[in-house]
Amino acid sequence: MSDFFTLAFLFSALTAATPLMFAALGGLFSERSGVINIALEGLMLSGAFTAAVVTYQTGNPYLGLLAGIGAGIATAAIYAVAVINFEADQVVAGMAINFLMLGLPALISGVIYDSTGSTPQIDQAHKIPIIFGGLSYATILAFVCVALSWYVLYKTPFGLRLRAVGENPGAADAAGVNVVGLRYTAVIISGLLASIGGAFLSTGQSSLFTRGMTAGRGFIALAALILAKWKPVPVLFACLFFGFTEALTIQIQSAPWAKIGDEPMPVQFIEMIPYVLTIVVLAGFIGLSRAPKALGLPYRKES
Amino acid sequence: MNILREVFSPLLAVIAAFIVGGIIVLLIGDDPLAAYSLLLSNSFGSVRDIGWTLHYATPLIFTGLAVAVAFRCGLLNIGAEGQLYVAAFATAWVGIKFGGVAVKTLVDGKMVDQDWSWASLPGFLLVPMCVLAAVIAGGIWGAIPGILRAKFGSHEVINTIMLNFVAIALVGYLTQYHFKVPGDPILQTAPIGEAARIPRLNEFFPFISHDVPLNVAFLLALLMCVLVYIFLWKTKWGYELRAVGENPSAAEYGGISPKKQIIIAMTISGALAGMVAIGEVLGTRYNYYHDFSAQWGFLGIAVALLGRNHPLGVLITAIFFGVLLRGEIFVDGFTRYVSKDLGFVLQAIMILFVACFQKFARR
């Protein structure tokens, strides 16, 4: 038990937090502009699948990452058209994107690799490289993205407009802000960031894409976003905390001391933490988590 | 004319989805018409085909009704998946605890029949108890986000999503540590007592072949379509529920409590989703099997939307989805490239299109 909280454990927590950070930051941009993003899971999956395929084919993780980002942006664009132009219900359209990304990668990989379950294994040398001790460059990038997101959101005119659109699109519009254009940009950014998170899952943390491999991480990222009250720096801490719980479940499952009879100690209760915490926070038991005012409301220009 | 208008946008969504899906099939390098004919023409050819199609449709009728009832009250229940998981486990639990179940267990190197149950009740008591367990468990799991919405104003969408994960983890734990037959590599409970089983339809209609698990839960699903219709449009309670969905502040002004209606709607919604357990646990698998749901809770959203949140529409859409689920197996086997995921992709595109075309109002 003495070797429980080692450096290796810290690194595994950071690694687990990495895809969450990208996805949650992606959600942050979209939701601060007033567009709900239930589709994070699907955006991550599109990035993960495309990155895995392109990395496997070219042997270059950077090309894979770029392709993954492209797929994430394309998926986000579909979502943006649905919810911004067609004013589709944002939750329903988001679920549809998630559904699509459960089926479509399987359909495509069935054609290319004759296997709907997973893509072939990427060579270890072709994965997103590691700095030391299992810590990936992607983790560093995630931290940089947090700082960058904070700067963009609070220190640039773009960020100011974005926040204004999320709170009061009518007033922002009257002040000359292009509401539709800004929301498009925000949703595209969320596709970009979430797909980096997905690409890291399939070409960094593991070395192949498996069907539905995000396993709810898009929703944990959403939970982190709510817990962090839609602010970038708290998002970092929420993701680190959830990464810590994920690392803990892995540690417990593999630790020889954590056994009850023949079965490993139950990890289900640790797995529940992010979800239960979100419910508790939303109910206002731990400070009020206030969403951007115009979240979920389509904007129609008054003529 | 009114019916035409109701049917227009779902029909358009289906056609558009098939066009986009056809393009995808074409890009993949297969013949879309051949794929679609496999997808659509294997569902009603024989009694056996019809039986399978209706069997696939049954859980979707329940979850479609569940989402529709909540939607009529202005709520989006994304939690049907969690509600049906909890219900399925509760049903299996009652079926084991009161079904006289003995499980072979290794004690001191010998296999011994260990009695897991408290009682061995006859079927006429046990089946209603199991059914009630499904309805109550699903109802409670649905009521939680309802209460949270009514008392704390927290959004039911987020809460139902979170409760799905909590539900699956919770019943996964209970199954793994308390109700699994020792040594079973599969995450599933011990089988329920024989008396808890509900009859399959081939027991009444011998012309339905033995391998079709279609059971009386399908008849219950049909009955629920009628009951939900009567409830929503022919009773005072249904009227109040819909009034809140149409305009909560006007309803409140008219003396209806939106908070109460939200809790009622979510409870009924959860109970309907929970009824999936009846057909699956008592009529098909005879135990609780983890991962038993093929995304029925989420497909219920599509069924309700395409069915315009009306029981008749839900029934028709659920059977249509049953056709797709039946057909995708043939697509998988008889095309060169296209896998059964085509059905899944089509459903996703349909949801997206129906959401785009409807512009339905939400608060």
Image: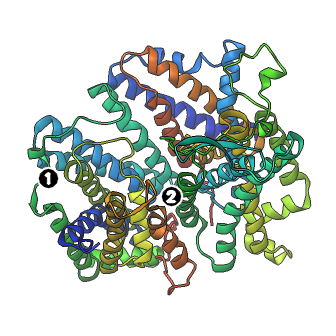
Give x and y (percent) for residue A31: 41, 68
Q: Nearer the viewer, residue A253 or A130?
A: A253
Give x and y (percent) for residue A271: 44, 63
Contact, CB < 8 Å: mark 2 with mark 1?
no
Type of residue at label 1? Ile
Q: Which residue is mark 2?
A: A90
**Location of residue A284 with respect to B202 vertically, above or below:** below
Give x and y (percent) for residue A54: 18, 39
Q: Secondary structure at mark 2?
A: helix
How many callouts does the rendering have? 2
Q: Residues within 10 Å of mark 1 (few under 14, many from 20)?
A: many
Q: What residue appears at the point 40 percent right and 54 percent down from the top-left corner?
A: A41
Disc number at residue B112?
none
Give x and y (percent) for residue A53: 22, 38
Q: Secondary structure at mark 1?
A: loop
Q: Chain of mark 1?
A: A
Mark 2–mark 1 Cα distance, whole angstroms, equals 33 Å
Disc number at residue A128?
1
Q: What residue appears at the point 37 percent right and 77 percent down from the top-left corner?
A: A163
Q: What residue appears at the point 40 percent right and 52 percent down from the top-left corner?
A: A215
Q: Is residue B250 left or right of residue B63?
A: right
**Location of residue A63 with respect to B200 vertically, above or below:** below
Q: What residue appears at the point 66 percent right and 20 percent down from the top-left corner?
A: B211
Q: Is residue A163 left or right of residue A170?
A: left
Q: Which image quadrant is residue B303 in?
A: top right
Scheme of colours in the image: rainbow
Q: Nearer the viewer, residue B326 or B304?
A: B326
Q: Residues within 10 Å of mark 2 (few under 14, many from 20)?
A: many
Mark 2 or 1, nearer chain start: 2
Work out whether disc 2 and disc 1 sit on a shared chain: yes
